[in-house]
Amino acid sequence: MKRKKKSSSSTPSSTKSQASKPPRIAIAIMAAGKGTRLKSQIPKVLHEVGGKPLLEHVIRAAVHLVPAKDVYAIIGHEADRVRSAVQHTGVNFVLQSEQKGTGHALMIAQSTLAGYDHVIVLSGDAPLITPATIAGLRDFHLSEQAAMTLLSAELENPYGYGRVLRKGSRSAEVQAIVEEKAASAVQRKIREINSGFYVFAVRDLYGHISELSTANAHGEYYLTDMAAVLRKARQRVVAWKTGTPSEVLGGNTRAELADIDEQMRMAKCRQLMADGVTIFYPATCVIDAEVEIAPDTIIEPYVQLFGKTKIGTGCRIRSYCVIRNSEIGDSVNVRPGCVMEEARVSSGAIIGPYSHLRPGSEIGEGAHVGNFVETKKIKLGKGSKANHLTYLGDAEIGVGVNIGAGTITCNYDGVNKHKTIIDDGVFIGSDSTLVAPIRVGKGAYVGAASCITDDVPEDSLAIGRSRQVVKEGWAREKRKK
Ligand code: UD1
Ligand code: CA
């Protein structure tokens, strides 16, 4: 039996004439402010938490709900800098060249938003907001057919936030929002705060936005005053209280940024642990959101993993390692104090302690890179070893090679970089310098303390050092004098 389905859209539209059409929804992100309280040269929304600028987190949440072409970041203070930092997200920008308040930010966007039915307004400095909460706010707004819907939260310490004045204790309707500075002693006791996230019916917002005034402590147009303005115009203003108040925290001060960063880092650690990664003392580890770690890898205290770092299964990353944009295979042991950037380490390798793998380092399966070894743009073949006090740069090193302590590839002549090629099975004696461009052939030996300036044929022995001189009795004679 066939049953007729109703229109697939489950979200009611506030515009009755368009009941069958889904409403056109834009997201505006307010990001034009300076962030005076941070006392910084860097604009507020570019301060980083969880390894990314505040604004980028908010944009990520926004583009979960609407396509980037419907997202508008309102920028102003250091606009060019902000734009270039987040341009890759594909969102649009609206310039608020003079920042006269959150209400003014929306005034500037009027012509841009005119083609939409509703606008979701987010704060560029509140990065913990989740798509689920924004969607909840949107759905509540649409079902209430409100002119303005604000996201509120019950905070233990509401200091500094705007307070929500409801029509009655059980009413969804809001009379006004009162800012901290303007609040009476009684109002300051209200713990329900305005999160700075809203949904407006575009027609109602712009039908009344000119009624905002600057008669307040900062001499600014407050978007929050739209609640009272719309109420006066007998429009419906409602609040939807979030069950996860931590999501609305704003990064207005360095201390608030630290709190938000800590929350994001802990959330990342908890997710990794839930996925089977052991993290000892997670509060000391700093792991970026995009880092991937396979189960049964152990992360010791005080490890920092940044960017797009990827780590396989069964590894152990010991304390004080700082690893950025690197790929590590399975069962790799990274001993304490290693620094890696854009490096690739194959399975079974042993790195450190105190190795420095710079960009382009490719360490082969089961290879060893040891104490105070620096590598850059090299391939170290399977099972090869460079265990002590060595610099290897611009080099291609085969399999089963032994690089003695203190070996240096002299890759730079002051103008250009040159390549060193060390073929399979070579043995480089300690304290050798290999002046590139140079090639040491398969199976060859280089005597300790050699300075190698010419190619070494395969299976040969090269010694490039002055002969030892022994003067018997010399010391005894000296003491007699
Ligand atoms: C605002 C709310 C407050 C709420 C709090 C929640 C107002 C007047 N107050 O206060 O009720 O509890 O958020 O976090 O809105 N911005 C612009 N252009 C401007 C001014 C600000 O784009 O001209 C941007 C800022 O960059 C920021 C956001 O708007 O991302 C909020 O501004 P901010 O100054 O941080 O407002 P709060 O004092 O936190
Ligand atoms: Ca704020």
Image (cartoon, grey):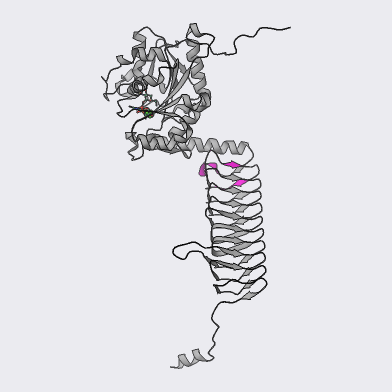
Name the image quarter holding residue 108.
top left
Q: Is residue 328 visible?
A: yes
Q: Residue at x 31, y 15 (%)?
A: 210
- Location of residue 76 in the rendering, given as x and y in whole percent from the top left corner: 34, 31
- Location of residue 121 in the rendering, given as x and y in whole percent from the top left corner: 42, 22
Q: Residue at x 66, y 51 (%)?
A: 347
> In what quadrant does ligand 1 lie?
top left
Q: Residue at x 47, y 26 (%)?
A: 69
Q: Which quadrant holds the N terminus?
A: top right
Q: Residue at x 32, y 34 (%)?
A: 36
Rendered view: 467 above or below 43: below
Residue 328 in magenta stretch: no
- Out of 426 and 250, give the one closest to the viewer: 426
Rendered view: 190 above or below 361: above
Q: Which quadrant holds the C terminus?
A: bottom left
- Out of 309 and 439, give the one closest to the viewer: 439
- Location of residue 406 in the rendering, given as x and y in whole percent from the top left corner: 54, 68
Is 16 placed left or right of 183 in the picture? Answer: right
Residue 285 in magenta stretch: yes
Name the image quarter holding residue 40.
top left
- Out of 256 and 11, give the one closest to the viewer: 11
How many marks can you see?
A: 0
Q: Is residue 176 visible?
A: no
Name the image quarter holding residue 232.
top left
Which span is picked out in magenta?
281-301
- Location of residue 259 in the rendering, given as x and y in whole percent from the top left corner: 44, 36
Residue lying furthest right in this view? 1
